[in-house]
Image (cartoon, rainbow, N blue to C red):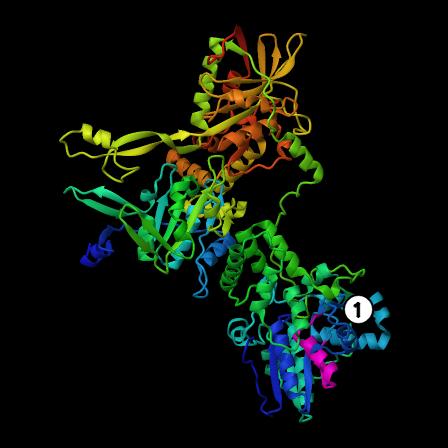
Amino acid sequence: MTGKEARDRVVTIDGINIHLREPDTIECDWVGQREVYRLLSAAFLKVRETDSVMTPVLVGPPGSGKTTLACAVAKAYQLPLYLVNCTADMRPDDLLVTPVLSSDRRVLYRASGLVSAMIHGGICILDEANRMNEKTWASLASLLDDRRYIESVIAGVKIAAHPEFRLVATMNDDSSTFNIPEYIESRLKPILPVEFPSQDELRQIIAHHVPHVDPDLIQAIQEYLEGKKKSGCLSDYSVRDAILILRYREKLAAGEDVSIDYVAKKILKIQESRPGDLFI
Amino acid sequence: MAEGGKRMSHPGNNLTIIPYIPTIAEYAARIQEEILRRRRDDFIIAVDLPAGLETQVIKATRQLPEASVVIDPLMRGIPIIPTSAPIEAVRSYLDYGLECRFIDASLPVMGNREEYQHFVQISRQFGLEKVLSDPEAHGVNVEELCKAWIDPALEEQRGYPFFHLPGVAASVGYPEYDPHTATPYLQTRLQCMACHLQRLLDTGIEVLFVCSESLHHGVLHYIEEDLPEIDDSYIVPTRICPVKEADVCRITREIPFLMYLYDLYRDTPVEREQWIRNLYCGAETNNFPANTVNAAIDYAYSLALTDRQVFPDIYNLIAAAKYTGGDDFAINVLESALSYPPNHTTDGDCIIRPILDYNFMNLENARSITLRRSLFKPSSRITSLRERLTPVERRYYGYTRWHRTPESIQAESDFMRYMTRRYVALEPSKEEWTVEEFSCGLGEGFDVKETLRNGTGDKIFVREPALENVACYIIDYRDPSPESLPHQSHEGQSTSITITPGRKKTTFNDCIFFDKNYPWIGVTEVQGRHYTSTVMVAFNKLDRSPTQVFYNLVAEHPLTSAVHLATRYAKYVFIFTDNRHELNDIPIDSRRVKVLSRGAIPDAVLRMMARFDIVGLRYDDRRGD
């Protein structure tokens, strides 16, 4: 690490040294669904100086590619990327600035990925943002509106966001999600649905992530999953599931023929169909 | 308003070309401005409209601002709208008595020019009807004649770009004309226009040529060439189709409401930015906060940029409204955008399908977006039903305490253990804390007690709020009613629980409560000592005794009254039911309430609380079972 790089990792705000986090390096390519890509790209644009910066939210079922989409757009903007995984027990200082004890018993202030992105002018992805509790969301209220700063009570500083800083949240729309406070919801716009890709797009995505695979095998896996879904043996499957099945099969096969059904049952909960079952 | 313009001077110095992009208001405004500027001069307006259709076009133009379309049997149309640049030229000609010439070719066929000329010659000799009745006998190859030689590249395009700045359009939209790749149809038209234009230029009078941006390079390419005479005297029959207000958007890429504003303020500059703001603000958006409207407007411009546009078209306007304010907001904006009052009362027998212009480009904006209006505003019937079901403070009638069997008590513990682990809504507790040594983060502050207990050690302890599950569970044990499951199967093994009334004994519904382990309330079917659950509500925590609330359940409407009760006393509610239709009439906050099917709970767990028995009567009011 050069001296400049080391210095860039520590900033001083109001006399308080804050240690920043390294940006994440995530390989992500977005395949297909150009419209939602365009919608997210547009959300990061600022046409006029007086425009407010938007905080888009990507909503969709698990495994539909929300995080990948956010990463891909961040990559296109060539801004450093910070990924923050939100949890139900996350506190405001976990999300902002955390005091830690150093080896020499001094208190150091470590910035989260969010604050590091704010200072460096990067893009921060709040993954699974709807799992955060209200108290933690409240600490972001001033960041999400025109004020564009956060206040760290722990460190006693106010940190303003870089003009290029962008924030995007991803959320699952399942039974484990609960409410975001209304005053926060009003600041989160636009809300972009990320849906399951079409079968053609799914084929392209799988081929992209698992190259050198026979296209017929990809087709067979798609047909298998769709068939199970239609027969009610499988409630749903995601893009991630399809890729995992293919990858796992490749590893298991090693020259032998392994059935898709055998592999799929290791990855997914597939029920066997029985006569007389209710189809709900 | 866009400034500048592309003017090209002919070597003879008497030609000025004003290019336009079809149906965009700024170009029509420029045409009007140019014509107004020159109206005292001696000049001819040449427009790229098919020669021979003057009567139809002028007749329809006189009806403006009422929009219509002049259409031929080949589904080629000329939209007669205020924001069409050539129509604005015709309108100005009518207003100021100038001279105007239509110089495009009508061309009844789309194919080979030689084949077409032969067809025209034969038709003149023998009569059109005779030739068409037996074309082969007259040496006419109908297939070749009618083959649509459309540039494949054009077929892939969505239509004309939504450019508002002519300088930008010229550099971004259209390449120079290449005669080697142009279709025979296009070549024929361009040569025809060049011929007519040359004839006008040879008169020495100033010619103002209003031409589509996609064509003027081609016309100039042929203008000095020695071209054979093209016989375009055969005019394809056309008709004027009235257009209903809802169909106006199908004949133009311009936003209909802005088209109306253009006509309303025809003599003033186009203020598109202000008009777009008016469109959003005037779209019955009273129920939407101002920041939502502002965010939608800003987002619409950002979307336009990603489409390489300066101003948003109707698709981007609606998409921005949808993703910032929801579908209802977007529908309001759409209805406002599509309104075109001059055609409000227009009716007719024309069915407006996707129409192409003479370049075979889509006239309408071909992108689509799905909008769903949220469900009804409650009618008075539903409002009164809701009032009936809303828990009213009922008079206290007393209760009786009973012992449950040990098995039942154990089943309750097992059931709640499963549910509290599987369906969780964690919130930091206000009463319970955990204490840990400080290493990272101060949590909820120092725990002085533990720190002092540590004595002379240099350890500091901090408090963390313990997380508690504040979810409430409503379990509907009733079988789905016929309305909710049209394909209910009664054959074979069913995965649903069958609740049978048992032997013929007197049964009645009763409201019950538990307060031993967890606070429960519910509606059950009672037969002696046997209780069969109908709808049960299990709280993790309840801030009052269940005895104070259980009587608010309504046995005739167990599910809806349970939902009212649970949402009143619990922050988060999970509802497990196969009778979702009963919840249609009550407002449910999806942020606090999750509705799942009863199958989300495994059968073995569900059966735990399906039935219970009582063993004895308690006469005191101590904490019972």
Quarter of the image with the N terminus of chain B in it: bottom right
Q: Is residue B423 left or right of residue B49?
A: left
Count of numbered tags: 1
Examine the rendering and report whether any part of residue B162 can be seen: no
Q: Is residue B67 above or below residue B576?
A: below
Residue B190 placement: quadrant:
bottom right
* Range shown magenta: B80-105
Q: Is residue B36 above or below residue B575?
A: below
Q: Residues within 10 Å of mark 1 (few under 14, many from 20)?
A: some
| Image location of residue B411, percent across then percent down | 47, 15
Residue to which mark 1 is pinned: B239
Mark 1 secondary-structure assignment: strand
Q: Is residue B328 above or below residue B584?
A: below
| Image location of residue A64, percent across then percent down | 47, 43
Viewer-nearest residue: A206 or A172: A172
Q: Residue at x 52, y 7 (%)?
A: B619
Viewer-nearest residue: B432 or A247: B432
Residue B102 painted magenta: yes
In the current view of this chain or complex, which residue is farthest to the top? B616
In the current view of this chain or complex, which residue is farthest to the front? B395
Q: Is residue A142 left or right of residue B453?
A: right
